[in-house]
Image: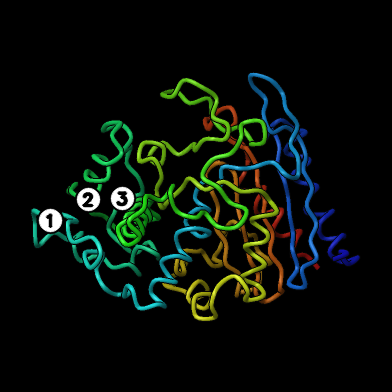
């Protein structure tokens, strides 16, 4: 479908700060995509998919390691569908599916954590720990996650919540996550020549390209918090399915939009001061970002979604890419008057 004059104007404005960031050398490259509820869309790439060891251009069709977008594109819809089907109860503890969670201490607080609390990051789990440093055997690491006495603290955004949700999906399906269907247009790896490079990994001793960047997901050989790959087109297709109702049930979409806290819904974020989507989103917007430099925002009020996919950690995360300000600037220009 042909893009309207208004969509073209918004896209051109929003693409400019990405081009500026690339020209300044802060980000190697990126792809911006916008889709309207009527299906019209625009996608454009700029910069490099890879800098080292050899330069390779970014393309509109480049595959990205979506990082934590896995949480909202893969894990959240599957957990909510299981709840809608009556297979799980969102307010039941994880032990209803993972009875061996902290099985040696019947009174452990971890045994009381519910599916809904994990989806909304309302648990005492820490943000993350380097699980990958505890060994290379994926099954033993799964057991480690289940049996570890976790340090409790105030609720924070936590990968552990979604690692556990991923383990529940595996237990219910009898399959590892990497043996599951990743969804239309998605995968758990990509051909290196087709993918945006991420880091020059200090423990895998290579530039990662087409294989998962997240250390814990790599060691677990698939997990619920990271590991999904996709293109701008597949991310926009997913977003359009939520905008027009074709990609999930009405009840599931309602839960994705339902606030559970000041910042979070079931799986997603909603607008708050200084959030990643900028200041001009409608109040019914949901969004999420990924550590590798990815993001997706869906504004149900305006009937519009946009994705900004970058390789901002290539070849290293230890550099201020300005991604936070870039995301906000792009969001404001997508939604500006």
Numbered circles on residues, count: 3
Q: Secondary structure at mark 3?
A: loop
Closest to the observer, 174 or 1: 174
Label 1 Cα neighbours within 10 Å, binned few <14 / some 14-19 / many ≥20:
some
The residue identified by callout 2 is 146
What x and y, as percent, mark residue 243?
65, 72
Where 84 falls versus 202 (above or below)? below
Quarter placement of the N terminus: bottom right
Tag 2 near tag 1, CB within 8 Å: yes
Q: Which color scheme did the rendering employ for the protein? A: rainbow
What x and y, as percent, mark residue 136?
30, 31
Mark 3 or mark 1, whichever is nearer to me: 1
First in sequence: mark 2 vs mark 1: 1
The residue identified by callout 3 is 126
Name the residue furthest bottom: 250
Alpha-carbon span between mark 3 and mark 1: 20 Å
The residue identified by callout 1 is 103
Label 2 Cα neighbours within 10 Å, binned few <14 / some 14-19 / many ≥20:
many
Q: Secondary structure at mark 2?
A: helix
Alpha-carbon span between mark 2 and mark 1: 8 Å
């Amino acid at each position: 479908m042909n893009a309207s004059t208004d969509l073209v104007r918004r896209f051109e404005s929003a693409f400019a700060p990405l081009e500026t960031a690339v020209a300044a050398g802060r980000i190697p490259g990126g792809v911006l995509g916008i889709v309207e509820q009527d299906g019209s869309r625009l996608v454009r790439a700029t910069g490099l998919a890879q800098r080292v060891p050899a330069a390779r251009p970014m393309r509109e069709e480049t595959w990205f390691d979506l990082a934590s977008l896995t949480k909202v594109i893969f894990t959240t819809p599957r957990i909510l569908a299981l709840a809608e089907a009556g297979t799980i109860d969102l307010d039941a503890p994880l032990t209803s599916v993972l009875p061996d969670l902290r099985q040696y201490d019947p009174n452990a607080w971890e045994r009381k954590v519910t599916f809904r609390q994990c989806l909304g990051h309302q648990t005492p789990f820490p943000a993350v720990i380097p699980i990958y440093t505890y060994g290379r055997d994926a099954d033993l690491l799964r057991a480690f996650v289940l049996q570890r006495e976790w340090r409790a603290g105030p609720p924070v955004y936590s990968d552990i919540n979604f690692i556990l949700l991923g383990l529940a999906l595996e237990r219910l399906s009898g399959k590892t996550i990497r043996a599951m269907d990743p969804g239309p247009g998605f995968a758990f790896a990509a051909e290196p020549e087709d993918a945006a490079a991420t880091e020059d990994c200090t423990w895998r001793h290579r530039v990662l390209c087409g294989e998962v960047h997240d250390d814990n997901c790599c060691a677990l050989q698939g997990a619920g918090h990271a590991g999904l790959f996709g293109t701008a087109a597949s991310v926009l297709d997913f977003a359009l399915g939520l905008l027009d109702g074709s990609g999930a049930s009405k009840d599931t979409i309602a839960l994705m939009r339902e606030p559970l806290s000041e910042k979070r819904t079931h799986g997603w974020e909603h607008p708050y001061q200084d959030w990643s989507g900028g200041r001009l989103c409608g109040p019914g917007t949901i969004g999420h970002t990924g550590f590798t430099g990815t993001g997706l925002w869906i504004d149900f009020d305006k009937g519009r979604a946009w994705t900004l996919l970058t390789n901002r950690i290539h070849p290293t995360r230890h550099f201020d890419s300005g991604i936070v300000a870039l995301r906000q600037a792009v969001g404001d220009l997508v939604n500006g008057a």
